[in-house]
Amino acid sequence: MTVTADPGRPGGRARGTARRQRGGRLRCFLRLALPFFLRPAGRAAALKFTLAFGLAIAAVWIGFERNAWNQTFFGALERRDADAVFRATLDWIWLLALLVGVSVQRAYLERMVEIEWRTWLTRRLLDRWLGRGGLWRLESAGGIDNPDQRVAEDARLLSSLTVELTLRVLLDVVELGLYIGVLWYLSGTLALPLPGGGSLDLPGYMVIAAVLYAGIANLVAHRLGRPLAGLAARQQHREADFRFGLARLRDAAVEVVLLGGGRREAGLAAGRFDAVRRNALDLARRHRIYALFQTPFSYTVLNISMFVTAPAYLAGQLDLGGMMQARGAFSTVVASFATLVFVYPKVAELMAVLGRLESFEQALADRGPRLCPHPAARAAASDALVLEGVAVTTPDGEPLTRPIDLVLRPGEKVALTGASGTGKSLLLSAIAGAWPHVTGRIERPRAGWPPVVVPQRPYLPGLALGDALLYPAEGGSRADAAGLLNAVGLGRLVADLDGPPRDWDRQLSPGERQRLALVRALLRRPHWLLIDEATSALDAEAETRVLALIDRMHPPPAVLMVAHRPAAIAACDRVVALHPAADVPADQAPA
């Protein structure tokens, strides 16, 4: 009779959830493994893995020969045959040298497979996160912590743990195939006396004892080690939070010093570390519980083998050399069959890594469309940008702004105004295609699209200044950069165009960074320019001078500018006001 757990009961729900998690992690693993190993580079890595496995089999064979060597050596000792002992010693040295060479080359090939697979994994995750709009979707929707850790750390752990565990399991299967026959042969038949007289003949009793002993050990290991996966996942999460907090503090070091917030930040960092410490203690306690079982099991395997093989020796079925050989075979069979006991902590860590990567991949797949115009957008029949009844909403469809109508023609400059927090920045993002949650209709112009966007907080990558100004392009002419730097009052930076990479966000003031962001936008000679308060850190004179550069472009771009200050508004041809939705106070709406 088949009994199915009732999903309405807590136990049934828990088991169903566990099964779904295991199924999801298996599918995630296949998505992250099969595409790589089916590619030419992956097939080359698979060949290296096969060679590593072959070398591992050679190491098993050497171990098998060393196990047989026990019979030769200890038999010679028992006979007090000095010449045979000397020859066996030379054989041991030769086998040891061969084992060292095979093991070193095997380890090298394993590392090569790990590096090549990790390289592909990292590039795949980076492409999905940064190259297909996943960065914006994750940041805007939330729910995924520390995606950088999943790219950097989890990809490394997945490749290294998988290669290590796969080789371990395959070798255990090979060792079982080699040693279980030897152990069965050496076991002979054990006669167990029965209470009423007579005896029970038990052939291959050492094999039966090894399988029972290892089977019970595997069950206990699973029972004790099961909580390790959840604790390991939580530890990875909290370690990443702690590191991210410290990195963020480093970037804001000047502001913290000026605010006198050092002690407060130290307390916050200590609080995040305390979460790391508490979970680490829980993990250490669980490891201790597991070690209370694993350690004595590891230490007693050899001794148990001595007790199991002793009856055959006492019965005269084995000499001392045969007993030592049987002892080694028994230990190998137990260790191979009970491999879960030794690798469970790493299996738990691998499950935690797969869980994190599965949620990461799921988030990238489910968080809306890629970085492209939202479903309401389409190409216009004219050369104008047209907005008809466009309103920004939340991801759930709740309106944040009132509908707006706008026609922006080539060469026009329009100022978009409104109280702080009315959704002006989100509207620009929607027009650019980075925010899909809008209603109404957006018609994109036929020519010159997509627009160049200048955000309020400019991003300057840590490259040479010339490369930072041409970002995101790689390379290109710097011919116009020097003139524009002089025009915006940053002539002193001309010498840095071909200089070494620098952390420009830390070395330049907010106003200087905003001017560089506008220079970068103008270097791309845009037809359509979206500016989000990108001159807010400039004084009135510098703002007027920078905005005048736009009029000197030929042809001049169409500009939609979020503006509050008189100089920016005066530079525009007309003004359009944006208002929050009737039920959303302006101070609660997003920018």
Image (cartoon, rainbow, N blue to C red):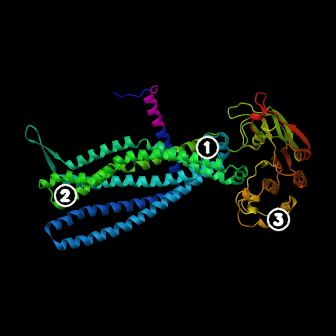
- Residue at position x 76%, y 27% in the image: 583
What's the magenta bit mostly, secondary-structure-wise? Answer: helix
- Residue at position x 30%, y 43% in the image: 216
For the question of whether residue 354 can be seen, the reply is: no
Q: Nearer the viewer, residue 300 or 250?
A: 250
Q: Residue 439's image quarter?
A: top right
* Real-space CA distance between mark 3 and mark 2, rounded to the nearest whole angstrom: 85 Å
Rate crowding at label 2 as few (under 14), some (14 to 19) or many (20 or more) other CA atoms within 10 Å: many
- Given this view, does label 3 or label 1 mark the residue nearer the observer? 3
Quarter of the image where the C terminus is located:
top right
Q: Secondary structure at mark 1?
A: helix
What is the number of the mark on residue 323?
2
Decide: is 566 above or below 99: above
Residue range corresponding to the magenta coloring: 7-20
- Given this view, does label 3 or label 2 mark the residue nearer the observer? 3
Question: Sequence-wise, which precedes: disc 3 or disc 1?
Answer: 1
Three-letter code, disc 2: Met
- Residue at position x 42%, y 44% in the image: 286
Q: Position of residue 195 (x, y in %)?
A: 10, 38
Quarter of the image where the N terminus is located:
top left
